[in-house]
Image (cartoon, rainbow, N blue to C red):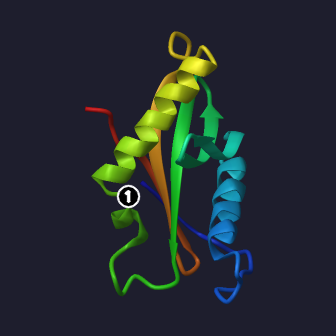
Amino acid sequence: MVHAPYTGGHSDLSPKYRDIGEKIAVDYLLKKGYKILEKNFRFGKLEVDIIALKNDTVIFVEVKRREKSNFGSPEEFVDARKQRRVMKVAKFYMSRNGLFDTHHVRFDVISITGEEILHIEGAYREH
């Protein structure tokens, strides 16, 4: 787990609150040396917020943002159902791009609360 303060500005009054959270996450990942492969990647009705690459690992990232953690931390909202949905998208993406034999897969969550970023690497695994 990596904690980092977010020093960029944002307004929680913005109608694109979720998009701002994803932009914060993308900026964070780029600064950490990740390559962004896809944003808001869809497979049917399913979607993954960010697909990134670092070394030989393809990372499927869910971004959760809350202004305060009064009702639980953002990462708590990536429940088992959401995890299964992300894994389905990951299987499709890896298969479609022929990456299973050459790359590892990891599932991360980036939780943004106020101005704090919590990057949970390997937040969950396929069972």
The residue under the point 43% across, 35% down is 88
Q: Is residue 118 above or below residue 108?
A: below
Q: Position of residue 60 (x, y in %)?
A: 53, 41
Mark 1: few, some, or many residues within 10 Å (few <14, many ≥20)? some
The residue under the point 33% across, 65% down is 76
The answer to which quarter of the image holds residue 126 is top left
Give the farthest residue toward the top.
101
| Location of the C terminus (image quadrant) | top left
The residue that label 1 is drawn on is 78
Q: Position of residue 119 (x, y in %)?
A: 49, 56
| Location of the N terminus (image quadrant) | bottom left
The answer to which of 21 and 8 lies nearer the viewer is: 21
Q: Amino acid at mark 1?
A: Val
Count the marks: 1
Q: Is residue 57 above or below residue 32?
A: above
Q: Position of residue 112 (x, y in %)?
A: 53, 70
The residue under the point 62% across, 70% down is 18
Looking at the image, residue 120 sits to the left or right of residue 101; the answer is left
The answer to which quarter of the image holds residue 10 is bottom right
